[in-house]
Amino acid sequence: MNGDILIYILIAVMVILGYSARLLTVSGAIAAFGVGFFTVLGLGLKGLFILGLFFVSSSFWSKIKSANKSKAEEILVKGSRRDWQQVMANGGLAALSSALYFATEDKLFLLGFCICNAAANSDTWASEIGSMSKVKPFFIKTFKRVERGTSGAVSLLGTSAALLGSFVIACASYYLFHLTEGEFLFILILGFTGNVVDTLLGAFIQAGYQCSVCGMKTEKTVHCGRKTNLIKGIPFLNNDTVNFLSGLSALLLGTLIQ
């Protein structure tokens, strides 16, 4: 019991540090503690390490700035500081999988936890690293080059980063949970698949807007002090919703295959 208390204190310290470093908002910090709590409940320190690997590595890439990336952030609704919606979109399903593993001890939920983190890491690395590409990406719906940071766009750098992001989580899961080579590939492939689904949703149904003042295409509903005009997608399907749906798709696909 004392050991568990120390672990939860560790989570609280990590969350406070994340807030102090401006990686989390207040709501994001509260949500992050909840995700950490349920992760430790089912999978202990090993699960917390996987979760921390995703959060720390993604935050690291978020903080790296370049001229290209700064311009890309003009397109995005939110910056590198995560609120509760971003935390839950990327970590909520993993926390749920861990809680279900605690209740059932079914390995399916352990693999689900790993897949969710691999998908989240794959997508985040693709977005953060891909936005630093020197070459503008292709929008998969039209195959025309668009601004960096556009949802539904792909580049060689971003795609490579997505595969590497999934690979990192799959490797850590393989060693920490003593998985088989087949389970390693299972996590790797489905994690990357989550990013592919995210890209498809981003291109075809995620909401996109255009500023009525400067003409910039963006995900923001307000730009240059005025409301933007919806030019594609469904209004309530923002980036957080798409992230959640892509992780859910990878999880459900893994459940069906398993």
Image: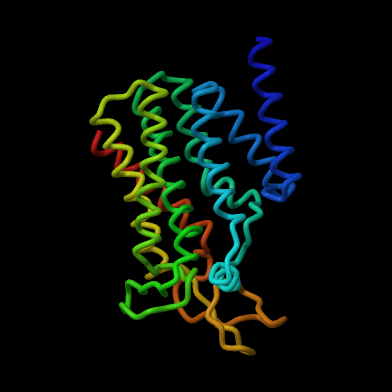
Q: Is residue 200 left or right of residue 120?
A: left
Please state the horizontal and vertical placement of residue 65, each as a whole percent of the image: 60, 62
Q: Residue furthest top?
A: 1
- Measured along the vertical axis of the image, is residue 18 above or below residue 124? above
Please state the horizontal and vertical placement of residue 63, each as a whole percent of the image: 62, 55
Please state the horizontal and vertical placement of residue 96, each as a whole percent of the image: 50, 34
- Measured along the vertical axis of the image, is residue 144 above or below residue 20? below
Give 125 or 115, whichever is nearer the viewer. 125
- Image quadrant holding the N terminus, namely top right
Give 135 or 200, whichever is nearer the viewer. 135
Q: Residue at x 36, y 74 (%)?
A: 139
Q: Residue at x 53, y 49 (%)?
A: 89
Q: Residue at x 69, y 42 (%)?
A: 18
Q: Residue at x 37, y 36 (%)?
A: 170
Q: Looking at the image, can residue 42 be seen?
A: no
Give 64 or 212, whichever is nearer the viewer. 64
- Quarter where residue 3 is shown: top right
Q: Looking at the image, can residue 160 be seen?
A: yes
Please state the horizontal and vertical placement of residue 132, each as a whole percent of the image: 49, 65
Q: Is residue 3 left or right of residue 218?
A: right
- Measured along the vertical axis of the image, is residue 244 above or below residue 214? above
